Amino acid sequence: MNFTLITGASKGIGAALAVRCAQEGMPLLLVARSADLLETLAQDLRTTYRVEVVTVGMDLLETFAVRKLYNYCVENDYKVRVLVNNAGLASWGEFEHIPLEDQLNIIRLNQTVMVEMCYRFVPMLKEMPYAHILNVASTAAYQPVPYFSVFAAAKTFIVSFSRSLRIELKKKKINVSCVCPGPTETDFFEKAGFEKFGNAGYKMKPEEVAAAAIRGMINRKAIIIPGFSNRLGSFFSKHLPTSWAARFIAGYFKP
Ligand SMILES: NC(=O)c1ccc[n+]([C@@H]2O[C@H](COP(=O)([O-])OP(=O)(O)OC[C@H]3O[C@@H](n4cnc5c(N)ncnc54)[C@H](OP(=O)(O)O)[C@@H]3O)[C@@H](O)[C@H]2O)c1
C-alpha cells in the first residue's frame, strides 16, 4: 500500500487536503503535534471513505524529527508515494518586536523541515509510480510583505526551491507542484497575531484551496494559485515594480 503523507494535517488547509485525498481513495499518513485532533479526523475518514489512515503526533521542529518520521515509515513499511509539505506558521508585526525564536521557527518549519522532508523521502518516491511532492507556499511569495516579512521571504524560498526541484526530479518521474493559497479561513491569521488587529479581507474556504491543490497536483501543474482574485493579485505583484507592491501591502498590514 502506498501513502500520501501530509504534514500539518490536524486542522486548516492540511485537514482539508486529507479529506480531499481520502475522497480520491488515497491511503493517508497524517502528521502534526495535536495527536488527538489527528485521530478524530482519521476516525472520520476511515468510516466515511473507507481508507487506511495512520496518524503520527509529532513536533516537526524537534531535533531529528524528520529523520525519526522517515525511519518510522521505513520500519513499518509505509511507502510514501505523495508527499505534501503543508505545516507552516507565521508571525505578524514589526520585525524588531517579534521574538527572534518565533521568526527562526518560521524559517525552520517552512524551509529547513520542508527541504529535509524532500531530501529524505525522494529515494522512496523514486521507487513509486506516479509520485508527487506538493509544497504549500503562499501568494505572499510574490512580493515582499512588510510586517509578515520573514513569512513572505520563507514562502518565496519554497516557490523557487519547488520550481528547481521540479526540473531535477522530472527525469526520476516525480512530479513537483507548489500551491500558493491566498487568505484562507483557518487559524492562521489568529495564530500569527493579526486577527486581533484587523481582518485579512476575503478568505477562501480550506476545502476550495485543497480541491484546487489536489486537482493541480494530479494534473502536474508547476504552480497552483487557487481562486481568481489570488491569481489576479499575483499577476499584478509579478508585473508591478516590487517597491510599489511592497509599499501598497505595507499600508494594509502596518500595525
Ligand atoms: N490560511 C492562510 O491564509 C494561508 C495563506 C497562505 C498560505 N498558507 C499556508 O498553508 C499552510 C497551512 O496553514 P493553515 O492556514 O492551514 O494554518 P493552521 O490552521 O494554523 O494549520 C497549521 C498546521 O500546521 C501544523 N503545525 C504547526 N506547527 C507544527 C510543528 N512544529 N510540527 C508539526 N505540525 C505543525 C498544525 O498542527 P498542530 O498545531 O497540531 O501541530 C496545523 O495542522 C501553511 O504552510 C501556511 O503557511 C495559509
Image (tube, rainbow, N blue to C red):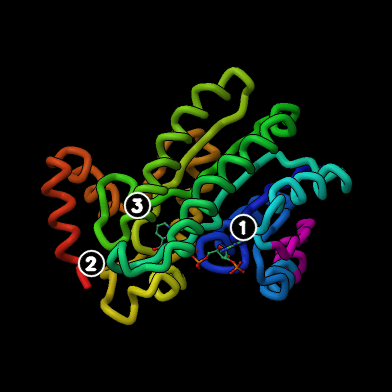
Residue 254 position, x and y percent, is 20, 68
Residue type (three-letter) at the residue carrying disc 2 = Phe
Q: CA distance from mark 3 to mark 2?
A: 13 Å
Quadrant placement of the C terminus: bottom left
Q: Residue at x 37, y 43 (%)?
A: 156
Count residues near mark 2 (Cα–Cα under 10 Å), then give few for <14, some for 14-19, many for 20+: some
Q: Secondary structure at mark 1?
A: loop
Q: Is mark 1 within 8 Å of ligand 1?
A: yes
Q: Looking at the rendering, which quadrant does residue 94 occupy?
A: bottom left
**On the picture, is 102 further left or further right than 156?**
right
Task: Name the amino acid type tagged 3.
Answer: Ala
Tell me the residue that label 3 is attached to.
152
Residue at the (75%, 27%) spot, across then down: 127
Reading the image, the residue beneath label 1 is 61
Q: CA gap, disc 1 to disc 2? A: 27 Å
Span of residues in magenta: 43-58
